[in-house]
Amino acid sequence: MRTCNYGQFEKVLRKAGFLRTRTGQHNLWERIALDGSARRVIVHAKPLRRIPAQVLPRLLQHAGLTENDLG
């Protein structure tokens, strides 16, 4: 399992077409599909903080991405 920090994960979300819709202590990223369904991912706002290994797969699942999308 790869590791990354929240800033790197947000770059992946941006490349995948997600838009940051709300900020604060946590950032809400959202992508609306052509059929109208929405994918939402809540990410911690501290960009240099490492994502725990047990949390990364869940974030990828919520975003509809795979580990290969991390680059």
Image (cartoon, helix red, strand yellow):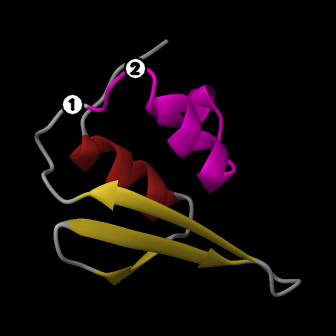
Label annotation for residue 53 = 2
Dividing the picture into quarters, in which one does residue 17 lie? bottom right
Residue type for callout 1: Arg
Nearest the viewer among 46 and 17 is 46
Position above or below: 39 against 6: below
Position in image of residue 27 (x %, y %): 30, 69
Q: What residue is rendered at 29% in x and 42% in y?
A: 8
- Picture quadrant where residue 45 is located: bottom left
Q: Position of residue 64 (x, y in %)?
A: 69, 50
Look at the image and give the residue range highlighted in magenta. 51-71
Residue assigned mark 1: 50
39 on left or right of 70: right
Q: Is residue 13 visible?
A: yes
Q: How many marks?
A: 2
* Residue in the picture at 34% in, 56% down: 43
Q: Position of residue 59 (x, y in %)?
A: 52, 44
Does 9 lie within the magenta span?
no
- Is 52 placed left or right of 48 in the picture? right
- Crowd around label 2: few <14 · some 14–19 · many ≥20 (10 Å): few
Q: Position of residue 14 (x, y in %)?
A: 43, 63
Q: Is residue 64 magenta?
A: yes
